[in-house]
Amino acid sequence: MPAAVVGIIGAIGAAVSGIASTVAGLFGAIGSTAIGTALLKLGLSIGLSYLVSAFNKPKQPKPEDVQQSFRQATAPRVRHYGRAKASGTWVFAEAKGGHFYKVIAIGQGEIDAIEEYWIDDKQVTPDAVTGKTGTNVRLRARTGKPTETHYDELAAVFPESWTAEHRGDGVASVFVTQYAVEQKNYLRNFPNGINTTVRLVFRGAKVKNPITGATAWSDNAAAVIRDYMTHQDGMRLPEKFVATAKAHAGWRTAFTRAAETVPLKGGLSEPRYRLWGSYQMDERPADVLSRMLAACDGRLVPTADGGLTLDIGTWAEPAVVLDNDAITGFSELGRGRDILTTANTVRATFLDPSQDYQAADADPWVDAEDVSVRGEIEQDIQLNMAPSHSQARRLMKLAAWRANPAWIATFQCNLRGLAAFGERFVRINYPLLGINSVFEVDDFRFVIDEGGLLAGVTIQVHSMPATAYSWDPDQEQGDAPVSENSETDDEIPVPDPPTVTFVGMAAELSFEPSPSPILNIEARWKRTNQSTWTESGVLANTASTFTTPALQENVEYEFQLRYVTERGLEGNWSVSALGTPSGDPAALDSFTAVGGLGRATLNFDTATVDGNLNTIAIYRVPFGQALNKTTHFLTRISAAPNDTIALTDGDPAPVNLLTNSGFSSDVGWTTTAGWAIANGKASHALGVYGGISQAVTLAAGTVYRIAYTILDYDAGALQTRLTGGTPVDGEWIWGNERKLLKLTAASGNTAFQVDASTDCGASINDAVIFAETGTCAPQGVWDYYAIPESASLVEGPASGPVTATII
């Protein structure tokens, strides 16, 4: 038996002769007892179970360590579980014909599938047929099947160095080709040169499902640990030790427990325990196994039939109760742990896929009440094979309960204490101390008397209530770290195409200044029907315009921009802006504007012969103001020589609601004292207050535009009103001129009315009222301008102003 234990210790890869001797001596001693035969079968399991916790735990490797790509003659092999993002060791690297070729070993053993390809910090998608990720890189990959296929493209280029025998059986790999580019563009395409990093995101090793027996990819914690313990590239534990009836049942239970659904915030869920991560072949197996167990609350447990199984923690009322009949004494009894081993703040790292598959800091688990009393006492743990923040937080909660339990103790028991062998939880009912609680077993030791016989056991425990295993995601999941991932864009940006205007036959290009002090602008142009470009040379960093030499009249050109770095690296050219230089168009033959109800009607006659005319730009300017082409621009219409064009500015539909608006008679109008209708106008005499009105249909809430002309004015004032229901009164007005007004109808308005003050002597004519619409041109007196333009917006002589009143 000692030889078997020592053999397993050797398989684990740790030189621990002291532990081996202890285990060997123990089982030699108990072999002669009445229960020695049964316990002897468990010797191997005991050695493994306690070996893991006996090792000093070195600092764990970080998940991101496997993302490095390097050249090393004898690099350790790496194997991957779950999902991983990794690069690896160069196994081939040569340049030929300006191209660079390399093969990278990603990992030992077959992986299930590749999900993503990354070049430096950018995700790329290789073409399914050619493997190209653009014009400069090609990627080919192998998943590491037991019998692989060699890279025939590489063998064709280097037949003396890479042959059909270089298959890479059982090694996942990627073949990278960096194609030759112009020297001036090399750093833009390959800023890291031949050290360009290629990383893959993939599903790692296939593992055996202990329930179905099928081998397929899985990140189930139990399946991963079982695979590592028995795999030839892992601990190499003989399969028979995990395949005994009781051990196999335990592995099935652990698999099911790890696959249980755990709720997350927001109504989502995830499996209870998954393992993602990698290990190197030169690591001590005990270290690898330790971080796997830590990430799933796992324990290796010996079984009564000589096997070894996995227990994944879940709280249950223990089947074993230790009471006065079993307990013979105690030591190290305390209410909680001492200051050196307790904690009220647990900090942890975990593997975060959203942080580029690197170790990230989980939200600390803090006992705020205890911190307020004792101050912060920290415990740091590494859960770098736990691939989710929720999984890390659940494990941190358990760590917090273990770091600050209600009770800790070491109990000495008689042989009845053997019932606790292999148990995670026991209930201790010890009235002498007032204890009747569930405890978690930290350590289990046999007591051998002077005659070499088994006399009892010693059990080190801490209290562990059901609350430790409960889970409320809304209250306990915490906040995962915010992803700091951002795709690094090393590409030189591409500017927008320039805005092209023509000054005579020269093109003036306008563009935004460079966004960076290290980028300068360069312009180029050519005829659209030719292939030869003319370049401006590099312009100043602050340049925002460039003017070409004179171009050929009535020929279409295209214009482009690009950025050039201060080191001379050239970016891609922008899309083209098109333009055609042309001569000045001729003046319009005529241009008129007539105002109306919410509109003005514009009429144009173009020159009979004008080969440069393409459009007419129209401007609307408040009466008497100077033309500002930016603020007064109205529209641009197509035009041709010898053409008559009509354009309506505004709504062509409104009509006057008044009948007999010119006062040709008194038909339709109602007058009061002082008003009389004659000679095409309505007049009011001095000395009497009164009004003139006409019934119209009005809609409450509608804005109505109103106009009439005051003439024969002598004194006093006039007021425009909407009457009936709630009257709406306009301002008092006076003076001889055309008046433009707006009133909003109220409920019950049924008439248009003009009142005159007692001292008013005046007449009105040409009265108008109509409903304003959303497409009406703005009310007022306007000056219109019309300017003919060529196709390249070269302007001809302006026509205008012509004035129109829009009611």
Image (cartoon, rainbow, N blue to C red):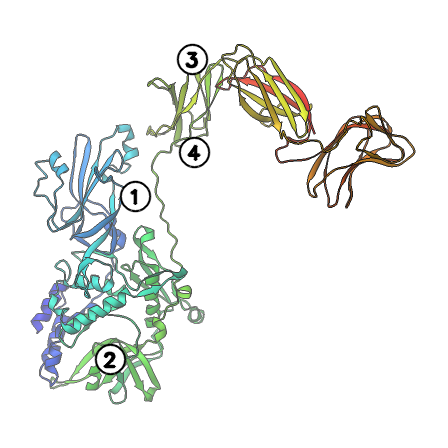
Crowding at dot 3, Cα within 10 Å, few <14 / some 14-19 / many 20+, comes out as some
- Separation of disc 1 and disc 3 at Cα? 47 Å
* Image disc number at residue 515: 4
Q: Which residue occupies the foreground of this view, 460 or 470?
A: 470
The amino acid marked with disc number 2 is: Ile
- The mark nearer the N terminus, 2 or 1, is 1
- The mark nearer the N terminus, 1 or 3, is 1
Q: Is residue 38 above or below residue 709?
A: below
In the rendered image, the residue lying farthest to the top is 609
Q: Quadrant of residue 781?
A: top right
The amino acid marked with disc number 1 is: Gln
* Residue located beneath label 1 in the image: 123
- The mark nearer the N terminus, 1 or 4, is 1
* Residue located beneath label 2 in the image: 459
Q: Which quarter of the rendering shows the C terminus?
A: top right
Image mark count: 4
